[in-house]
């Protein structure tokens, strides 16, 4: 004889617990704490010193709740891993410029028309070289946070750039010297030798080996000098010599060239006057003096 086991109906409190958990899961799916995520950090790779402006933008996604009313949202910018932010925005309050950026931002700039992303970006007026470095955007809510970092270089042009040639004390060699001053960040310099000036198919410029390069930091910028001594045997034909000045991490490059003619050393940066040039030619002076005496004697005769 088989005995049937009676099944107990589910307890009301078990049903209520299940319904509450299901409801919480549904609410979390619809309104819940979706993680904040930075989708794009737009930081200029390089910008010229003293240019009109630099805009650093931090695009991010929020959960539905934060997107509607910006509840718990905080946007901060940091510079070079500093412990304190240089910018902070907590909606609905006005953004704040802090530390290094105090007084250097346009706080009215709006990167978006949405309440939750209106003041997410930095609008830096007239950026200068001390703003070169790592920039970090940190976005946080009550439930999560995210950050992203990028580097920006603010470079300065050279205040002086010249290429000269001279004799190092004997006639068998030529000293090529290139100088630049007031460059930031630390620049690179190279001397190049081109083809013959009158060649119908000139060679491509080649970097000269064994060039001596020295840099010197001064007043927040760098001076740089490159020198190379060439034997005249290496310069048997008219040759183009070029100095290349380059700023790393940017597309900034400057070139300056001169032409060396065998047996004729030019001084393109000298300011020798006609009088001083005349004074250096004793035979010419003697001839002119004799000519003047002859003319005067003829007039008196």
Image (cartoon, grey):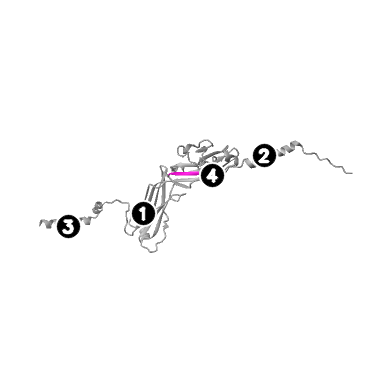
Residue 282's x, y, as percent? 22, 55
Residue 59 disc label? 4
Label 4, label 3: how far apart the Cα atoms are: 85 Å
Quadrant containing the N terminus in the rendered view? top right
Q: Position of residue 280 (x, y in %)?
A: 25, 53
Q: Which mark is residue 24?
A: 2
In the rendered image, which residue does mark 3 sit on?
291
Q: Residue furthest right?
A: 1
Mark 1 / mark 4, whichever is N-terminal: 4
The secondary structure that dominates the magenta segment is strand
Q: Which mark is residue 175?
A: 1
| Residue at the limit of the structure toward the left, as seen here | 301
Secondary structure under tag 3 reads helix
Which residue is the extreme one toward the bottom?
200
Q: Quick check: can you spot residue 28?
A: yes
- Tell me the distance, in whole angstroms, between the alpha carbons under discs 2 and 3: 115 Å
147 to 292, vertically: above or below: above
N-term-proximal mark, 2 vs 3: 2
Q: State the mark number for residue 72.
A: none
The quarter of the image holding the C terminus is: bottom left
Front disc: 2 or 3 = 2
Residue extent of the magenta highlight: 52-56
Instruction: Report, in whole angstroms, how far the alpha carbon at label 4 lies from the one at label 2.
Output: 30 Å
Q: CA distance from mark 1 to mark 2?
A: 82 Å
Disc 2 element: helix
């Amino acid at each position: 004889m088989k005995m049937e086991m009676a099944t107990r109906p589910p307890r009301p409190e078990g049903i209520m617990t299940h319904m509450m958990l299901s409801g919480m899961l549904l609410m979390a799916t619809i309104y819940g704490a979706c993680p904040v995520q930075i989708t794009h950090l737009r930081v200029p790779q390089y910008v010229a010193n003293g240019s009109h402006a630099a805009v650093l933008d931090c695009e991010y996604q929020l959960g539905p709740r934060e997107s509607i009313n910006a509840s718990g949202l905080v946007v901060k910018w940091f510079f070079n891993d500093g412990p304190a932010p240089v910018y902070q925005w907590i909606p609905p309050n006005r953004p704040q410029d802090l530390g290094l950026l105090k007084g250097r931002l346009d706080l009215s700039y709006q990167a978006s028309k949405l309440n939750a992303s209106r003041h997410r970006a930095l609008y830096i007026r007239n950026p200068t070289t001390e703003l070169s470095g790592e920039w970090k955007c940190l976005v946080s809510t009550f439930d999560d946070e995210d950050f992203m970092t990028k580097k920006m270089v603010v470079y300065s042009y050279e205040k002086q750039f010249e290429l000269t040639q001279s004799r190092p004390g004997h006639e068998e060699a030529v000293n090529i010297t290139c100088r630049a001053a007031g460059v930031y960040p630390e620049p690179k310099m190279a001397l190049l030798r081109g083809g013959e000036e009158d060649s119908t198919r000139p060679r491509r410029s080649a970097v000269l080996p064994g060039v001596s390069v020295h840099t010197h930091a001064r007043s927040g910028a760098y001076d740089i000098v490159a020198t190379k001594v060439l034997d005249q045997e290496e310069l048997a034909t008219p040759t183009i010599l070029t100095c290349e000045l380059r700023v790393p991490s940017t597309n900034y490059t400057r070139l300056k060239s001169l032409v060396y003619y065998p047996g004729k050393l030019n001084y393109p940066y000298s300011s020798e006057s006609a009088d001083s040039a005349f004074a250096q030619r004793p035979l010419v002076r003697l001839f002119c003096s004799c000519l003047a005496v002859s003319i005067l004697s003829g007039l008196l005769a």
